[in-house]
Amino acid sequence: MDFLSLCVTALSSFVALFIIAKFIGHKQIAQLDFFDYITGITIGSIAAEMATELEDPWKPLTAMAIYGGAAWLLGVLSNQFPRMRKYLNGTPTILMDHGKLYRENFKKAKLDLSEFMVMCRQQGYFDLTGIQTAVYEYTGRLTILPVADKRPATPGDMNLAPEQELLFTELIMDGRILENNLKRMGLDLTWLDKQLKENHVHSPTEVFLAVCDRNLKFVLYKNSSH
């Protein structure tokens, strides 16, 4: 009976954690501000406690609900009242501008020069003279504006007008035809069979992935053992 109860509370903990995570919203780890990060750890810890709590599982469940609700409420408030964001999330900090490093802003951001150099190198800037402005975002990421004459050239700089690329839709995945996607594109099996023959493919089972865009640009990748 104790084992069955443990299984039930563990499963309940998993379900509650899943629901609360969906309720709060999805963010990548790099996008979490400090409060979101701490809240996530706390809710996870409470969920772990609930998974093994056999006597009063409602207590940690209530705590999870309160933390989740508070995180959601703060998110709503920060969206409704933009002025609150700088108190809840913090504000971006300019660490470097026009070739000058701001020592006081480094202290404010609690970031040392070694960490700053690492973050610059991670974005491909080994020479600081190529940086016009460096901003330390409240999410903990470094945003860099390169010096104009050292940034990568764009088609617009060369007066070129490349054709806009479109999203591709999967038509075949791992040898299986995705007929719903094919219909959504306004295509049929006859058209697909023609494309396969033009690419010297005799059966969809020979295809690992095949995609197509709205301009009917068809690309396929055959199965390969290498």
Image: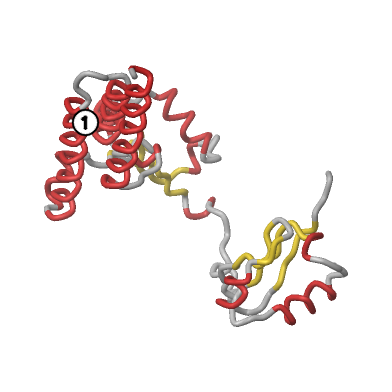
Q: Outermost residue, front direction?
A: 1
Query: Please, is residue 161 above or below residue 171 in the view?
Result: below
Residue at point 71%, 72% (across, down)? 218
Colour convention of the picture: secondary structure
In the displayed structure image, the side of residue 208 where residue 108 appears, left or right = left
Residue at point 19%, 36% (across, down)? 65
Res 92 quadrant in image: top left
Query: Please, is residue 50 above or below residue 36 in the view?
Result: above
Nearest the viewer among 76 and 109 is 76
Instruction: State how many labels appear.
Output: 1
Residue at point 19%, 22% (across, down)? 56
Residue 105, given in percent of the width and then of the height, sits at: 27, 31
Query: Please, is residue 133 above or below residue 189 in the view?
Result: above
Query: Please, is residue 219 above or below residue 23 in the view?
Result: below
Residue 87, given in percent of the width and then of the height, sits at: 14, 39
Nearest the viewer among 192 and 164 is 192
Residue bearing mark 1: 61
Res 209 quadrant in image: bottom right
Residue 151, given in percent of the width and then of the height, sits at: 53, 53
Given the image, on which type of amino acid does mark 1 rest? Answer: Leu
Residue neighbourhood size for the residue with mark 1, other residues' Cα within 10 Å, grouped as few (<14), some (14–19), many (≥20): many
Residue at point 30%, 23% (across, down)? 45
Q: Quadrant of the N terminus?
A: top left
Residue 44, given in percent of the width and then of the height, sits at: 31, 28
Nearest the viewer among 214 and 12 is 12
Nearest the viewer among 81 and 213 is 213
In the displayed structure image, the side of residue 27 where residue 126 appears, left or right = right
Q: Secondary structure at mark 1?
A: helix
Q: Quadrant of the C terminus?
A: top right
